[in-house]
Image: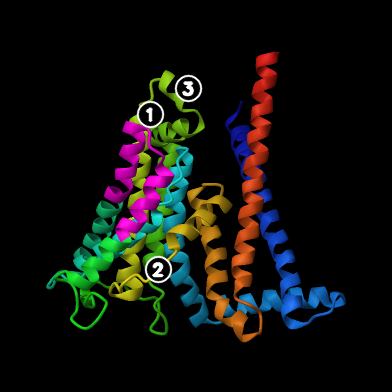
Amino acid sequence: MSKDNSVLNNIKDGIKSLIFPLFAIIVSIFVAVFFVMWSKGYPITQYFSALSDLFSTIWQGSFATKRNTLTTITYVTPLIFTGIAHSIAFRCGLFNIGAEGQFIMGMIAGGIIGLIPGLNPVIHVILIILGGIVIGAIWGGIPGILKAKFGTNEVINTIMMNYIGMFFANWIIKKSVFAVPGKSSTPLIQESARLMPLSNISKGNISIFIAIIFAIFIYWLLWKTTIGYEIRGVGINPSASEYGGINVTKNIVLAMVLSGALAGIGGATHVAGITYQVQDFMAFPNFGFDGIAVALLAKSNPIGCIASAVLFGALKSSATMLQFNDIPKEIVFLIQSIIIIFVATDYIVKYFADKKKKGEVING
């Protein structure tokens, strides 16, 4: 096969992989319109008026003004990081529910390292990112080791790590030397630790570019290196990979470490660019959980996670505008849920199609 044909086939495969996610988005929007009609009293004959109302409200709340666009970026950035984190785990056949806890630990790392005085801004930001990488990798690596060495279920372990991470973070925020008397938060980080904002009208900052750089890097790692080939091979068929000389145990741990590191960076940059401190966690921030939807819609493609995060970030950013227009903000969760259902259906269809093909090969 010529190089031109190979490139053409890759483009065709890429387009085919986008068809179902786009279909899921379209269907979810059209279903959500019925709830808009119900909430605003539209008759059935005004379906397209309700559709226009929904689209215009989401647009106004997310991208209509510079301020809204920058605010949307503050939601998009952590979703890119957690989406990539889940993509790495999915590619290795793992389900890292613990991205939420890894994100929280990244926030703690950013909040503590950001307090160091007298550092050059570039050095300080690099240290915060490295801190997020290290603590996220540790928090992801623990369930990875338990999975690889003892065969324990990574879903259960990562869920437990989420709660351990949240309660440990709350102890640091309220009881440790980093606690502020009378407040449920760490002190504000140093000016040198704060990421450069894109404008003085919003907290949208350069972390969006850091997220895009990591998305490109992880794509390169997964598809252009031996490391990525082995991770994907283990995800496709662990037994065949082991027979072919791939160390399955090592790659399971590595995938969870990388996944945790990306979620940790997301948490660290969120503190350095948005919150400037870590407040006590009354509940999970949910960026890690929303990252599952981002990765599923992107078909576990790190580059695709950028576009997917923009969609979910826009929905999150427009929630307030929806309420102002008498549209329940729960519409956002409805759209997300329908998208996930359709994408999951695609995986199920492919699973049974592959199973049928294997059966035909064996019988043939």
Secondary structure under tag 3 reads helix
Identify the image quadrant of the N terminus.
top right
Mark 2 neighbour class, 10 Å CA radius: few under 14, some 14 to 19, many 20 or more? few
Secondary structure under tag 2 reads loop
Where in the figure is residue 273, as x and y percent of width and height?
33, 72
Query: Closest to the observer: 73 or 261?
Result: 261
Q: Disc 1 and disc 3: Cα gap in Å?
A: 10 Å
The residue beneath circle 3 is 240
Quarter-of-image position of residue 238: top left
Mark 1 neighbour class, 10 Å CA radius: few under 14, some 14 to 19, many 20 or more? many
Q: Is residue 356 left or right of residue 124?
A: right
Q: Residue at x 69, y 61 (%)?
A: 28
Where in the figure is residue 356, as x and y percent of width and height?
69, 27
Q: Which residues are magenta?
A: 137-165
The residue beneath circle 2 is 283
Q: Residue at x 24, y 62 (%)?
A: 109
Residue 248 badge: 1
Whether residue 242 is in magenta: the answer is: no
Q: Are marks 2 and 1 in contact (CB under 8 Å)?
A: no
